Image (cartoon, helix red, strand yellow):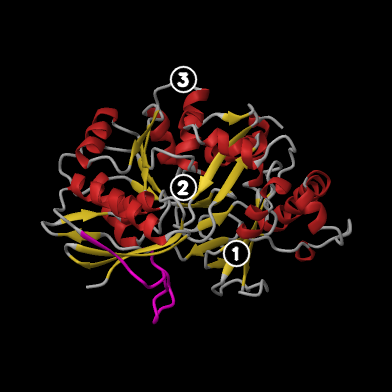
């Protein structure tokens, strides 16, 4: 299927009933399982006892740890392996390019456990583009305004590394080198630099992490008038949504995605995240992988990405806690929708009133070599504590401390004391929720 045919199929699915989407899911699932069983040694072994007439729950769940431990055997192209990928990703000039001219390579951080390497084949790339083209905008009037103003899109995200936002943005720029309708601005650049670039570009669409956009919106120097603001990467709270809408005078929306599954759910004008049921199988489960009924909070989620053949994600575990809703939505869509218990890290405020959004610090810390998990806790206006799990705690701490101090100086916080805690990262003892970055004073 070409990109245009995928867009047409995605558009047709918008009019499907939930039951028809389930039949489409089943057809695509069986094709995916057949391909995985034939071409992936990992899945061939995993499904050795699974017959042709299987049900979804007959397929064993797969964790990130399992997949990364058997990474080479998971891939269905035997010419691609870890060694080749490591050589490719060691050169940052390769961001946005395909390895061997075949697959885009993305990385996820290890802050929630095990770092992951994700490959997208042409089918996964095209489906991602089709869903973005057909379902990005919650309201038709925003799409019309966006097109009228030249489709100028500015993203304020991490502008380094093989992360999805950065890698896909650079890939698209390489595909359309003569178009100047997209820019990606480094979220960790000085605010004055970000504001200057945004003012000069004057985007029709502004996207970024909610907490960072909330901080940028406080600067009177920022003089842009986007047609829509689309956030991602963090939970968009009602408070931040309202603040951004008042500041920019436009509609503000969000979406729910991950590198492994792509766009999991798109928001409608009623602020409901509708699952992309034609390309994703979405299963809320408890800690023992038992199904959780609609209307109840899950312990985690199993996703099946029906588009990716090079690296099959079949009943792949995400640690997100969600509530799936099967009741109808006033927007008219028949797809089920989901509430996500997203990141709710704190904005930190230092001596002199300098405020720093959590995602800026998150992107620094997830680059620390050898560190698999972290938690940064502000203990005073001039003091933070780092909890970490790492192969060499002292070495990782020194690297993290140096990077943080450089960043704090750039932001004008004054001297910040950074200490290493003997405690490991931990969930709140009362709520049970885990925050990577928060204030405790």
Q: Which of the numbered marks, if any, corresponds to residue 138? A: 2
Identify the residue shown where x is 40% and y is 59%. 235
Between residue 79 and residue 234, name the one nearer to us.
Answer: 79
Is residue 197 a member of the stretch shown in magenta? no
| Gap in angstroms between the C-alphas marked 3 and 2 | 28 Å
Q: Which residues are magenta?
A: 417-436
* The C terminus sits in image quarter: bottom left
Mark count: 3
Residue drawn 30% across the image and 63% down it: 346
SS state under label 1: strand
Q: Which residue lies under the disc numbered 3?
A: 177
Residue 353 location in percent, x, y? 13, 57
Residue 234 position, x and y percent, is 40, 56
Q: Residue furthest bottom?
A: 430
Disc ID at residue 301: 1
Residue 129 appears in view? no
Give the foreground label among 2 and 1: 1
Mark 2 and mark 1 residues within 8 Å of each other at the beta carbon: no
Q: Quadrant of the N terminus?
A: top right
């Amino acid at each position: 299927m070409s990109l245009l045919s995928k867009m047409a199929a995605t558009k047709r699915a918008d009019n499907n009933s939930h039951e028809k989407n389930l039949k489409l899911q089943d057809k695509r699932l069986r094709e995916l399982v057949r391909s995985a069983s034939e071409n992936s040694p990992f899945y061939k072994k995993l499904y050795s006892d699974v017959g042709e007439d299987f049900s979804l729950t007959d397929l064993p769940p797969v964790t990130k740890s399992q997949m990364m431990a058997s990474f080479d055997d998971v891939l269905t192209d035997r010419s691609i392996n870890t060694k080749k990928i490591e050589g490719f990703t060691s050169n940052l000039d390769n961001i946005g390019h395909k390895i061997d001219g075949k697959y885009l390579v993305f990385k996820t951080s290890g802050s929630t456990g095990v770092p992951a390497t994700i490959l997208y084949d042409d089918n996964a790339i095209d489906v991602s583009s089709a869903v973005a083209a057909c379902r990005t905008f919650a309201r038709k009037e925003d799409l019309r305004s966006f097109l009228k103003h030249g489709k100028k899109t500015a993203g304020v995200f991490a502008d380094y590394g093989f992360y999805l936002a950065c890698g896909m943005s650079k890939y698209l720029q390489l595909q359309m080198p003569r178009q100047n309708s997209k820019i990606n601005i480094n979220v960790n650049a000085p605010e004055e630099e970000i504001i200057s670039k945004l003012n000069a570009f004057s985007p029709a669409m502004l996207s970024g992490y909610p907490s960072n956009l909330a901080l940028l919106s406080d600067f009177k120097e920022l003089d842009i008038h986007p047609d829509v603001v689309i956030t991602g990467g963090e939970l968009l709270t009602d408070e931040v949504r309202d603040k951004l809408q008042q500041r920019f005078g436009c509609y503000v929306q969000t979406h729910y995605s991950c590198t492994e599954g792509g766009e999991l759910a798109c928001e409608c004008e009623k602020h409901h995240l509708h699952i992309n049921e034609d390309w994703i199988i979405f299963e809320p489960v408890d800690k023992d992988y038992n199904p959780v009924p609609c209307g109840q909070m899950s312990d985690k989620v199993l996703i099946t990405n029906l588009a990716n053949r090079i690296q099959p994600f079949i009943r792949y575990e995400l640690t997100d806690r969600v509530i799936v809703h099967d009741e109808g939505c006033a927007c008219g869509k028949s797809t089920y929708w989901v509430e996500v218990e997203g990141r709710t890290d704190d904005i930190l405020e230092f001596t002199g009133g300098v405020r720093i959004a959590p995602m800026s610090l998150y992107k620094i810390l997830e680059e620390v070599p050898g560190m698999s998990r972290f938690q940064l806790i502000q203990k005073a206006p001039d003091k933070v504590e780092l909890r970490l799990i790492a192969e060499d705690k002292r070495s990782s701490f020194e690297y993290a401390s140096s990077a943080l101090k450089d960043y704090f100086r750039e932001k004008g916080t004054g001297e910040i004391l950074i200490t290493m805690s003997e405690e490991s990262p931990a969930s709140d003892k009362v709520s049970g929720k885990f925050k990577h970055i928060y204030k405790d004073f």
